[in-house]
Image (spheres, grey):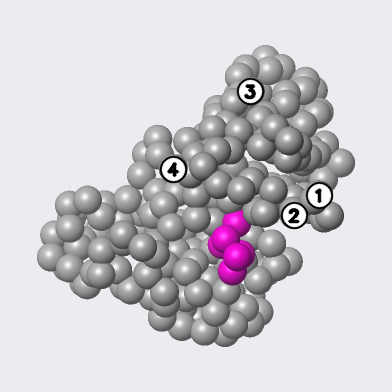
Amino acid sequence: DIQMTQSPSTLSASVGDRVTITCRASRSISTSLAWYQQKPGKAPKLLIYQASSLESGVPSRFSGSGSGTEFTLTISSLQPDDFATYYCQQYQNYWTFGQGTKVEIK
Amino acid sequence: EVQLVESGGGLVKPGGSLRLSCAASGFTFSAYNINWVRRAPGKGLECLSSITTSSTNMWHADSVKGRFTISRDDAKNSVYLQMNSLRVEDTAVYYCARSTATGTGDYWGQGTLVTVST
């Protein structure tokens, strides 16, 4: 099984801040990595796939990078609608998710 | 419009059974792999089961292997999750999600709540 480790688990930030979330895979997954946003009571929303490709309709302030075992999600300027929980997901071998990063208002 | 709608959740006693359904519309259902994912209270997302097109392959996570079974009926545009021997720790919101051609999940249902309690 491929394990995904995400950090930090909680992040306090202000509107306008640049935010970075890190995800590490237990073995190389090439670029088979996605990022999701989830808000309370809602389904996860796909933001990034193939490590760095922006899903249609997702604001350009979201970006992803990395390959192999190290990946990052960056929000260039945090907006009020961005306070949520973010998950990384590997899909090279079925699906495994990171434990999540809750982005809170500072 | 692509839609996935889960149903079948509810309150069940430990050791009981439930069958979740995921009804799809707005796309060629038979051409897509489908997954079941859950989120337990205070925890993260966990993929439980996946089924490929034509039911060629089914996969279940170790946490549910031998207790849960995924299946699909392409004539009804539906995927099912038969859950037996339910445990308190199976309490969660259960989502179905469509896999894209690259393998990730682009469309998700709104979820159905399963509560396992005495």
Q: Is residue A83 left or right of residue A35?
A: left
* In contact (CB < 8 Å): disc 2 and disc 1: yes
The mark closer to the camera, 3 or 1, is 1
Which of the chains bears the disc numbered 1? Answer: B
| Near-viewer residue (A1 or A67) | A67
Query: In the image, are marks 4 and 2 on the same chain?
Result: yes
Distance, label 4 to label 2, CA atoms, is 22 Å
Pointer 2: what residue? B52
Residue sitting nearer the eye, B45 or B2: B2
Label 3, secondary structure: give it. loop
Q: Position of residue B67 (x, y in %)?
A: 82, 36
Assign the C terminus of chain B to one quadrant of the image. Answer: top right
Badge 3 density bin: few <14, some 14–19, many ≥20, Cα 10 Å = some
Mark 2 vs 3: CB contact within 8 A: no
Precedes in sequence: disc 4 or disc 2: 4
Mark 3 vs mark 4: which is more N-terminal? 4
Residue A96 on image: x %, y %: 62, 60
Which residue bears the numbered disc 3?
B8
Magenta segment boundaries in residue numbering: B99-104
Please state which amino acid type lies under the numbered disc 2: Thr
Q: Is residue B92 visible?
A: no
* Residue kind at label 4, given as amino acid type: Glu
